[in-house]
Amino acid sequence: MEVKVRTNSFPITQLPTKKYFQYDIVFRPEIPIPRKREQAIHALQNSIAPTLFHPRGVYDGKRLLYLSHQLNLPGGGGATFTVRLGNDPNAPIGSPGVYEVLIARTASELVRPMDLNQLMATGGTIDRKAATAINLLQLLIRQTSNQNNPTNNGRAFFSDIGKKSLQNTGIELWRGFFQSVRPTIRGMIVTIDTSMAAVYESGYLMDVAMHVLNLRNTRDLAFDGPHGERDLRKLQAHLKHRLIKTRTTGERTKTIHALVPGPIGRFKFHNLKSGEDTTIGHYYEKAYNIKLQYPESFGVRISGQNAPFVVIVPAELCKVLPGQLYKKRLPSDRMKDVIDFTAMAPAARMQTIQGVSQAGMPSPIQGYAQSEYLTDAGMVVGVRPLELKARLLPHPKMDFRNGDLTPSNGSWNVVNRIFKTPAEMGFWAVINFDSSHIGQPAVNKIIHDLIRCGREVGMTVNEPKEVLGGNAHAPERTLDAVYQAMNGKIDVIVVLLPREADELRTQVKHWGDIKRGVRTSCLREDKLRKANDQYLKMVAIKLNARMGGHYALPRCVIIPKLAQGSETFMIFGADVAHPGPGTNRPSIASLVFSDDPNAAKYIAYSQVQAPRLEIIENLEGMVKEAILFFGRNKQPPKRIIFYRDGVSEGEMEAVKLVEVAAIQNACQEIWTKKGVPTPLPTLSFISVAKRHHTIFTPLDNNVDDRKTGNCLAGLAVDQLRSPLAPDFYLQSHGAIKGTSRSAHYSILVDENFNSDIPTHTKLAFELCHLYAKATRSISLPAPVYYADVSAVFLWSLKLIVI
């Protein structure tokens, strides 16, 4: 069915008409902080040499400055300027805030944005010249908003308007806008989306510390209680490297290098000026006429590790500066608050993006016409978002043992349904790790309900062989006791957990999946307390899947064609999970592959590789293992469909070159060694991206989900085609809350369907109905989702020890 949608992309109606010169920037001494580099270049262009830098250039935040005119530099090809960010006009170079800025014309060619017209017309890869031109456009649209909003990460800027504090964390959530330029066959477009950033809480340091540690009495900030050392470590981990200002340093910004436990007022040091030993409390009273109100509290060390002497400031004299981005992983128990803050209905989101919302900060689309950088470039961005034709795909019917069921907006109900292939639970056990909230009568009822619901859906469920209470502080002891009592013959262990039990669950999964190879299914007390038949049926679905059964299978069109006659096929999903920010632990590459003609059963392989390497290092070896496993009792595959998750547009070409060759080499080696008489399998290699900022909202009733305002599940859009590769967007799931985000598919190699977009959209949509534990179509094809889950799962088990 053809439908109409609106997207959050705006056309660039006029590319820059000017050519740009590139200049290399070097700071002496080096400036490691991006914000300070921005300040130095801003001062250079506006205060030091405003006539020379007119019109002002756009700075990439690192080493390059782009100007629409050639500089008449005093030194010919290069020149040196002194920039002072402080108030002392006589401070020498190298002192705080005083730098030499060396600027010189690079040997690169002039940047001609108009050359992008050829890329959009003919397609192909983005060469160095095109990449530089696109990067220039990115800088042009972001320069003004980033200058006006110092809290930014380059791609998005944020404001404290309407911010939300995450209780007892010292973290705030700020709203903002993301901006990006990308090429399409329709022309260059600017995509604008709402965004969110986690920011360190600002304000008086004492208040921040109280919030982080959830304290009510400032006396506890002396850290002399039973949990003092633990609290001090937690607070230091949160505050280390944060920027502050103090009552004694004026406008100068300082960095927290460490915390010093109290009583800070009685902390003794040798005063180099007076030559006497004194206390911090006495020093501040004599030098600054400041009498400490909290002399028992802690202090902060603002001197570096290699400083000639230690400088300590009482915490009560410090204020944490606003707008410092929090780049660590957010607390898992606060994710609901994060989702509530970021979720926005589609109509409200589009109004905000278009700048017609009365609440919050203004959208950048309203400021492009007034931007000095875009005006100088001759670049024009349209203010009306693009409207596109799209297709609404029909859902495949879900096949149960007692009949078919047609999904409604991507979901279906298993009430009164018999599982397609029900499993048997003959040898299972129950362990209760929350006896204080789940008494034995409740355990008995849970067992009774699980048996009843399992049998209602067609499963064979016997009475459990073991029912034990367990010690949550030593879960492996109870798990091992069950294992030994049942002689290792266990179908599954149902584990009852407290409401907050992330660490306990990790230990259970590590024991079951890594140490013993025993299936486990964890149920939380808060869910069990209000469990109804619908919840219990979902538990039955998960148990059935763990036992190798399928509760239902979609009646597909494309997947059966892959296995026509005696042909066999393999569908792969691959992903790489990277360590969190600030750590150098290895990444994990995960590969899953189908092992049945319905593409419903998958086997997973995972391997450790170099940190933050997106290309899968040993893909050739992993694919060989997969094909050999697949071929143990089948014919070798005639077709391979390979879905690759987590690849950005900038990485696609490199991933394609390396990983496609790895797959082909793996096949060639097996076919040669095994003497396989059939031709090598045909390969389709598709990149799937979920982390993009393109959204679609309905323009007609045929695609409008009246409950949420989103587009209905099954929306396929191929009118934002990239010149780099055949691609499409597929919104395969129905939204529960907020604005749905589609998956973006780029077909990098296709020897199976000749890059036929309708075939690829149907196949991907069918695979989105094959996730074994959901009664709804999911946002990614099942093999991609499994690969992601497999990689992240290994991280959650903390398998890697460095």
Image (cartoon, helix red, strand yellow):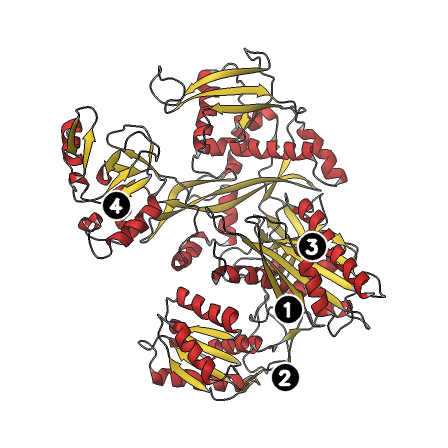
Report the disc number at residue 686: 3
* Element on which disc 2 rests: loop
| x, y percent for residue 137 | 60, 33
| x, y percent for residue 686 | 69, 54
- Residue 44 drawn above or below residue 796: above
358 and 725: which one is in front?
725
- CB atoms at circles 4 and 3 under 8 Å apart? no
| x, y percent for residue 770 | 63, 69
Name the amino acid type tagged 3.
Answer: Ile
Report the disc number at residue 602: 1
- Asked whether residue 734 appears in the rendered view, the answer is no
- CB atoms at circles 1 and 4 under 8 Å apart? no
Say which of marks 2 and 4 sits in front: 4
Residue carrying label 4: 207
Which image quadrant for residue 299?
Answer: top left
Which image quadrant for residue 590?
Answer: bottom right
| x 16%, y 31%: residue | 277
Name the amino acid type tagged 1.
Answer: Tyr
Residue carrying label 2: 402
Which image quadrant for residue 259?
Answer: top left
Q: Residues within 10 Å of mark 4 (few under 14, many from 20)?
A: some
In the rendered structure, which disc, 2 or 4, sits on the residue that comes first in sequence? 4
* Element on which disc 3 rests: strand
Name the amino acid type tagged 4.
Answer: Asp
Q: CA distance from mark 3 to mark 1?
A: 18 Å
Question: Quadrant of the image for the N terminus?
Answer: bottom right
Q: CA distance from mark 3 to mark 2?
A: 36 Å
Q: CA distance from mark 2 to mark 4?
A: 62 Å
